[in-house]
Amino acid sequence: MLPCQLNIAIDGPAGAGKSSVARAVAQALGLVYLDTGAMYRAITWKALQMGVPLTDVDALSSLAAATDFHWDSENGILELYMDGKPLPAAIRSAEVTQQVSLVASYEQVRKEMRQKQRALGNGNGVVMDGRDIGTAVMPNAPLKIFLTASLEERAERRLRELGQDLSLLPQMMRSLAERDHKDSSREHSPLSIAEDAIIIDTTGLSLSQVVDLVIGHAKRVCFGEGE
Ligand code: DC
């Protein structure tokens, strides 16, 4: 395939499959993949480690400003590093997952993060996933995708991802619905669909079906091919 070096924004609610789709699309097209949710999680983890109160907006935005994110390649694979180290597994812990929506709700913190996200994307095309990529971080991206799926399917996928029992479905549905509500109703850059985004409902679709759909749209944008 000829190089298709475009910026692709992928937004959507928790558990819609954004990161799996974004990673696979980036790999297929030879683009960099940036998980912006991981960056909000990393700042939340760092604040918890350092004992910065998550209600102290000024301290959190200074912390975000002073944090270095850069790409490093481990075995030829580009990976995001924070302050010289790979992002710790603990950014996926229950504690961080519970607190990250609060940290991500502060405009001062988001402003710092958006700048860093844009800088990390500078270059030869990036696939970025998050909640405000098409609306705020890369509003000029030539391809914007909004991924969604039913609450039940998103909860099921999340449980499988975590290797947890499906009997936990009601709890997981409640926790995702709560996070959806927090991410969609916050004052600053809430989860919203860019006017020019292509909405893909992934309920009942496999990962490879969704990846193929997105790659089809990318080829159309790059080369004017039919979908
Ligand atoms: O995609 P995720 O679940 O890892 O994201 C973690 C949190 O970060 C989620 O609650 C919403 C927030 N987030 C955000 O506000 N803006 C982004 N661009 C990415 C994530």
Image (cartoon, rainbow, N blue to C red):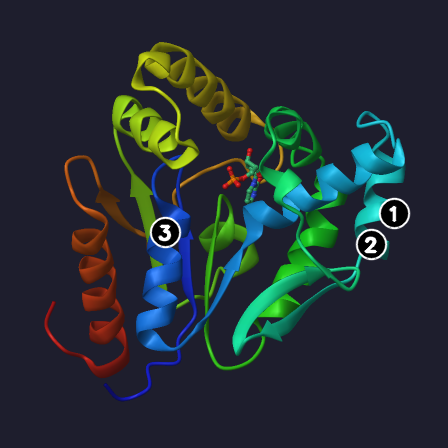
Left or right of 199? Residue 186 is: right
- Ligand 1 sits in quadrant: top right
Q: Quadrant of residue 196?
A: bottom left
Q: Quadrant of residue 117?
A: bottom right
Left or right of 68? Residue 175 is: left
* Residue 2 numbered mark, or none: none
Amino acid type assigned to the residue bearing label 1 in the image: Ser
User: Is 85 or 214 nearer to us in this picture?
Assistant: 85
- Report crowding for label 3: few under 14, some 14 to 19, many 20 or more residues within 10 A (C-alpha): some
Task: Say whether marks 1 and 2 touch (CB < 8 Å).
Answer: yes
Amino acid type assigned to the residue bearing label 3 in the image: Ser
Residue 65 placed where, x, y %? 82, 54
Residue indicated by mark 1: 62
Amino acid type assigned to the residue bearing label 2 in the image: Ala
- Quarter placement of the C terminus: bottom left
Residue indicated by mark 2: 65
Q: Earlier in the sequence, mark 1 or mark 3?
A: 3
Residue 56 placed where, x, y %? 86, 29
**Rendered residue at 49%/53% (across/down):** 133
* Alpha carbons under labels 1 and 2: distance apart: 5 Å
Residue indicated by mark 3: 20
* Alpha carbons under labels 2 and 3: distance apart: 28 Å
